[in-house]
Image: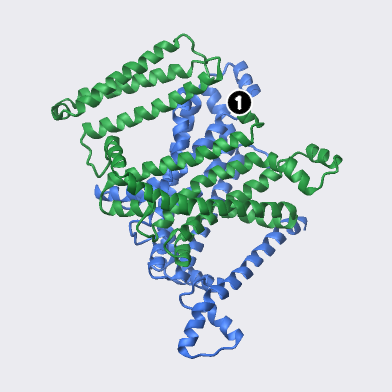
Amino acid sequence: MERARDKFLPVTIILAALVVVWYVGAVMLNAPFQRDLDRRGDVTRSTMDFVGATLSQPKPTLPAPHQVARNFFENTFLRKVSSNRSLVYHAWITLSSTLLGFAFGTALGIAIAVGIVHFISLDRSLMPWIIASQTIPILAIAPMVIVVFAAIGVTGIIPKALISTYLSFFPVVVGMVKGLRSPELTHLDLMHTYNASSAQTFWKLRVPASVPFLFASMKVGVAASLVGAIVAELPTGAVAGIGAKLLSGSYYSQSIDMWAALVAGSVVAVILVTLVGLAGRITEKMMGARPA
Amino acid sequence: MSAQPNSTIPAWRSLAAVVVAVVIAAFVLHALDDPAFVAGRKGAGLTLAVAVWFLAWWGNASLSYYHPKSLTLARLRDGFVALSFGLVLLFFWEVLVRLFEVPFILLPPPSAIGVRIANSIPILAADVYQTIFKAVIAGYAMGCLSGFAVAILADRFLFLRRGLLPIGNMVSALPIIGVAPIMVMWFGFDWQSKAAVVTIMTFFPMLVNTVAGLAATGQMERDLMRTYASGYWQSLFKLRLPEAAPFIFNALKINSTLALIGAIVAEFFGTPVVGMGFRISTEVGRMNIDMVWAEIAVAALCGSVFYGVIALIERAVTFWHPSVRGGQA
C-alpha cells in the first residue's frame, strides 16, 4: 500500500497531467490551421465541434495522444511484420544494428578498461583522449562514416553498428575502470596474504567487484547505442529503421507517423534498458549478492 | 599493483627517447614527400614509424612512473604524456595514409585537413556562429535554467519529486534526439528549432542531477541549520546549493556535449545554408571529405573548449571540494 501511495500515485498523476497538457497544447497549436480551413470552407462550428476537429486533423501540428496511440497500435499489431509500414519491422532493423554495435562497444570498453587498470602509462596517455573523444559531437561523424563506407562498398548494418559502438564504449570504459579499481585496500591486502598472483587477484577479486559497475554502465551504453543507430539512419536516406521513418515523416509532414516512430523508439529503449537491468540482477544473484 | 614506482630510469633518459622519436618522425615526414620513397620503401617507412611509436611509448611509460615532488611538475608531466600520445597518433595516421596511399575519400591525412581548415576559416567561422553561438548557447541556457528551476520546485514539493524523478530517469534512456524533425516542423529551419531540441535534451539531465545534489546534504548539517533557526531558502542557498554544486556541474558538463550533438543532428532535418550540421551533410554528398573532417575538428575543438570552460568555472566555484584540492574524493 505504501509503495502504491509513494511511488505509483505521484507518477500516475503527473503522467495524467502531462496528457492533459498535451491535449490542451494540441487544441491550441492546431486551432489556427483549423480556423483557416473553416473560413475557407465556410463552415461554422460550435466550440465542442471545433475542438473535436482540431484533434482529428490528418496532418496536425501536434497530434493528439489518441491519434498517436491509434497509429502506433495499427502499425505495430495490425500489420504483417514483414510489411514496410509495420513499426515492428522498422524497430527490428534499428534494433539489430543497435545490438551489434552494443556488443562491439561493450567488448571494446572492457578491453580498454582492463588495459587502463593494468598499465599506468595507458591510464595517463589514453584516458584524457578517451574523455576528449566524447566531447566531440560524434553523431556529427555518423553521415560521413556511412557515406565513406558505402563508397568502398560496405553498406548495411556494419557502418551503423560502428556508430553505436563508438557511442557505447565510453560509458563501459569509465564504469569498468571504476569497477576494477573498486576493491578496497584491505581486500587487496588479503589477496596479498594469500600470495595471490596478479592474474588471480584480477579474476577472483577485481572482476567480481566490477560486475555491478559493468551492468550500470551497460544500461547507459545500450541507450546510447540506440540513439547512435537511429541517427545513423538519418543522413543517408536509409529506407528502413526508426530513423528512416522519422526522416520520411518529416519530408511528407506526416506528423502522426513521426510521433508513432518516436514512441516506437522509446518503447525499444525502455525494453533494452530493462533487459540489461534484469540481466544484471540475475547475474548478481547467481554470484551470491544479497538483494539490496 | 598498477602503480609500481620505477625510479631506475631517470627522467632525462625518457626525455631523450622522446627527442630521438621526434627526430625520426621529422625524417619520415620529410621522406614521405619523395614519391620514390613512398613507392619503394614502404617497409622501411613502416619500420621507422613503428620505431617512433615504441620510443614515444617507452618514453611516456617511464615518464609515467616518474613522480615529481611539485604539483606543477606532475601536472606538466600528465599534460605532456597525453599530448605526446595524441601527436604520435596523428603522426601514425599521416604516415599510414600516405605510405599506403589510402584513397583520399576514405581517410585524408591530417596535414590535408589542417590545410583545409586554414583555407576555409570564414566558412567555418560562419558555421560556428550559426550553430554554436545562436542555437547551442540559447538552448543550453534555457534547458539548464528550466531544469534547475523545476528541480528546485521538485525539491520543495515531495509529491512532485516522487512523480518527476522516475519519469526523468526513464526519459534519460529515451532517444530524445528524435524530436528534432518535430521541432524543425514547429519552429522553422532557422536556429530557433535547434535551440528547442537542445533545450529538451539538456532539461532532464539537469533536473535529475540537481535533485540528486539537493538530496546529498547530510542530516547533521541540516540539523545544524535548524538550530540556527534558518528557513528553507536560507538553508537552500547557504548549505544545500553549495553541497549540490558538484552534481550541478556534472549535469552542465554532460549537457555541453549533448547540446552540440542536438544542434548538429537537428540541422540534418533542414537548415538555412549555413551551420555545422548543414556543412557536414552537404560536403559529404559532394565527397569533400577533407572539409567534413575540418568541420569535425572544429566541432571537437568547440566541444572541448565548452567543456573546459565549464570545468574551469567548476574549479572556481567548488574550490572546497576534495577532488579540486587534489585530495581523494
A13 left or right, relative to B178? right
Chain that is blue in the image? A
B38 left or right, relative to B227? left
**Residue drawn 46% across the image and 42% down it:** B303
A250 left or right, relative to A195? left
Residue A87 quadrant: bottom left
| B6 in relation to A203, above or below | above
**Residue drawn 67% across the image and 48% down it:** B211
Residue that badge 1 annotates: B326
Secondary element type, mark 1: loop
B36 left or right, relative to B176? left
- The 10 Å Cα crowd at callout 1, few under 14, some 14 to 19, many 20 or more, is few
Colour scheme in the image?
by chain
- Pinpoint residue B11: horizontal percent, then vertical percent: 44, 12
The tint of chain B in the picture is: green
Front position in the image: B103 or A291: B103
Quarter of the rendering occupied by the N terminus of chain A: bottom right
- Pinpoint residue A237: horizontal percent, then vertical percent: 33, 60
Residue B226 visible (yes or no) = yes
Front position in the image: A249 or A290: A249
Residue B158 quadrant: bottom right
| Amino acid type assigned to the residue bearing label 1 in the image | Gly
- Pinpoint residue B147: horizontal percent, then vertical percent: 61, 53
